[in-house]
Image: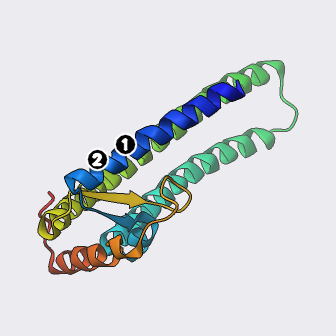
Amino acid sequence: MNLQKLFILISLTFQLSAVGQNNQNTGIKMCFFNLDSLNMQCLMFTEIDQEIQKVSKEAEKKIQTKQKEIDEWSEKWGALGNLLSSEQVIYEQEAVAIQNAAMEFEIKVQEELLMKQEVLMNIYARFLAYYTKQYAKNNGFDAVIAYQFGQNIWYYNAKFDCTNELVKIMNEDYKKGLRPYE
């Protein structure tokens, strides 16, 4: 098994070497941006993050309100003390119905939250895609690559880092209310 891993590693190294040689021959020009840094500095991302936090709190409030209703129902039954067998049957039936309704409610709230988060993140993805493409076209780059610490790129020459330039362009247009990506 170790030989198999070594073989895969060697073949990947040869493939990467070939890609590197092809890049030199074809003159591919690339730049990188640090996605974490860009997100922290980008006004739109900050707004979207705040909106996600807002809808998350709203969802949490809905669930807490539902839990409060369940607690009140439980207190009502608890105040009755020892139940007659007929009352115990009614209590158990209601408890099952309330528990099922609460689970369905929570699932619905969570699904709504995920959908809202997905919509917001898709808007940001289109925003980012538009500006990286424009940046590449305007600066003669064939590729713009995002990286985050610990992912595929462990070292790059800082002269290829376009994070700050992208942030500047994106924030300037965002402040002006420009939304060309929509």
**Quadrant in the picture for residue 137:** bottom left
Q: Identify the residue under disc 1.
A: 18
Q: Is residue 42 above or below residue 150?
A: below
Query: 10 Å neighbourhood of mark 1: few (<14), some, or many (≥20)?
Result: few
Count all numbered tags in the image, as a single digit: 2
Location of residue 23 in the rendering, given as x and y in whole percent from the top left corner: 28, 52
Pick the quarter of the image with the N terminus: top right
Q: What numbered label is drawn on residue 169?
A: none
Residue type, mark 1 in image: Ala
Q: Secondary structure at mark 2?
A: helix
- The residue positioned 34% from the left and 58% from the top of the image is 145
Q: Identify the residue under disc 2.
A: 22
Q: Which is more toward the observer, 101 or 146?
A: 146
**Quadrant in the picture for residue 46:** bottom left
Residue type, mark 2 in image: Asn
Labels 1 and 2 touching (C-beta < 8 A): yes
**Quadrant in the picture for residue 135:** bottom left
The Cα atoms of the two marked residues, 1 and 2, are separated by 6 Å
Query: 10 Å neighbourhood of mark 2: few (<14), some, or many (≥20)?
Result: few
Report whether residue 100 is seen: yes
- The reply, left or right, for residue 126 in relation to residue 182 is right
- The residue positioned 74% from the left and 45% from the top of the image is 75
Colour style of the rendered protein structure = rainbow
Pick the quarter of the image with the C terminus: bottom left
Q: Is residue 57 above or below residue 69?
A: below
- The reply, left or right, for residue 12 in relation to residue 178 is right
Report whether residue 99 is seen: no
Q: Secondary structure at mark 1?
A: helix
